Amino acid sequence: MFSVKDKVVVITGGSSGIGKALVTEALARGARVATCARNPEKLQSFLVQQDRFFCFKADVSKEQDCKIFIDAVNDKWGGADVLINNAGISMRALFEDAELSVIKELMDVNFWGAIYCTKFALPAILERKGIIAGVSSIAGYRGLPGRTGYSASKFAMQGFLEALRTELLYSGVHVMWVSPGFTASNIRNVARSSDGSAQAETPLDESKLMSAEQCASIIMDGVEKRKRTIIMTGQGKLAVWLNKLLPSLADKLVYKHFLNEPDSPLKKY
Ligand SMILES: NC(=O)c1ccc[n+]([C@@H]2O[C@H](COP(=O)([O-])OP(=O)(O)OC[C@H]3O[C@@H](n4cnc5c(N)ncnc54)[C@H](OP(=O)(O)O)[C@@H]3O)[C@@H](O)[C@H]2O)c1
């Protein structure tokens, strides 16, 4: 089994939620960890482990920021063994109402951010026969209403990773993605509204969701076992299978689920 111990693990979006928990989990497993975020100061407490950890201020939607971040990893530790494309944002607005800039921002962060980091990290990962992972979502298998841009970005990410996995089939590099279910984090508070502003509150009871720590532990186990894909929850597995076998029924059930959320934008129709 692959072990992240003493390996260089690069995690994008490590300042909050699943990314922050991944940083903690990878450090606990003995990895050297580099992360980036637009607000890396949230990670000050980790800086005590300076020999094994560094964080970088970078906006993954900007190609140049990603290049500078990955160059810094290369300079400090010679290159990444594992890249986990985790940085992401969500949205909650009907497509009819959403400004196009919202959909573009979703693609820029969730899709292009993963493309840039993977592009710049790939030479070292090829040399080290390492691992490239994406933190996707059930929305990468099944479009979710009120999340058109989010679903598009996760479908795009999965398509990219699947194609890359096939290109790299005999290179020794492993490519994978993981699809958490609803996980407690900041994602719904900062999810974009129709005008691009943050929602500021979550429609879910976050205390009832999977914890970011449990999610990170499952992801890191999956990385070390070189899993192909992980769909983390029973609800997620059911949604993916139902969507394959009975897609019209899946439309209705998914619609009903999101209609029943507090302040659901679907109530407009
Ligand atoms: N939580 C869930 O229910 C759930 C379910 C399925 C999939 N996911 C996926 O899990 C991943 C992590 O989300 P989370 O739930 O942990 O959300 P979160 O608590 O909001 O954390 C998102 C992280 O991404 C970073 N980020 C956002 N935009 C960025 C940008 N432009 N450049 C660099 N970093 C950026 C944030 O840092 P800054 O704000 O400091 O930049 C933060 O560290 C996402 O890809 C999300 O789609 C989450």
Image: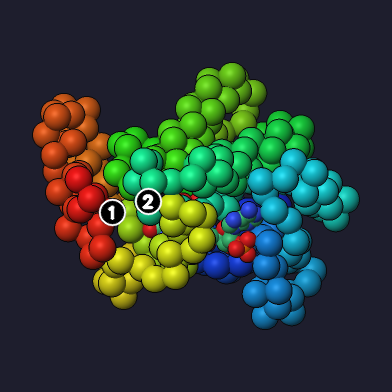
Q: Which residue type carries mark 1?
A: Pro
Q: Residue at x 76, y 61 (%)?
A: 56
Q: Kindly identify which numbered label has been placed on residue 117.
A: none
In the rendered image, the quadrant that contains the C terminus is: top left
Relative image position of residue 19 (x, y in whole percent): 55, 61
Task: Establish if 257 lies above or below 103.
Answer: below
Q: Which corner quadrant of the image does residue 248 belong to?
A: top left
Task: Establish if 249 lies above or below 233.
Answer: above
Q: Kindly identify which numbered label has been placed on residue 93.
A: 2
Task: Please state which of residues 126 and 269 is positioned toward the viewer in this rendering.
Answer: 269
Q: Is residue 98 left or right of residue 267?
A: right
Q: Earlier in the sequence, mark 1 or mark 2?
A: 2
Relative image position of residue 203 (x, y in whole percent): 30, 66
Ligand 1 under 8 Å from disc 2 Cβ: no
Report if residue 11 is visible in the image: no
Q: Residue at x 57, y 53 (%)?
A: 87
- Crowding at label 1, few (<14), some or many (≥20) Cα neighbours within 10 Å? some
C-alpha distance separating marks 1 and 2: 6 Å
Q: Residue at x 15, y 49 (%)?
A: 256
Circle 1 SS class:
helix
Number of marks in picture: 2
- Crowding at label 2, few (<14), some or many (≥20) Cα neighbours within 10 Å? many
Relative image position of residue 155 (x, y in whole percent): 43, 33
Q: Is residue 167 left or right of residue 220?
A: right
Q: Which residue type carries mark 2?
A: Ala
Task: Establish if 112 lies above or below 221.
Answer: above
Q: Which residue is mark 1?
A: 265
Relative image position of residue 213 (x, y in whole percent): 44, 68
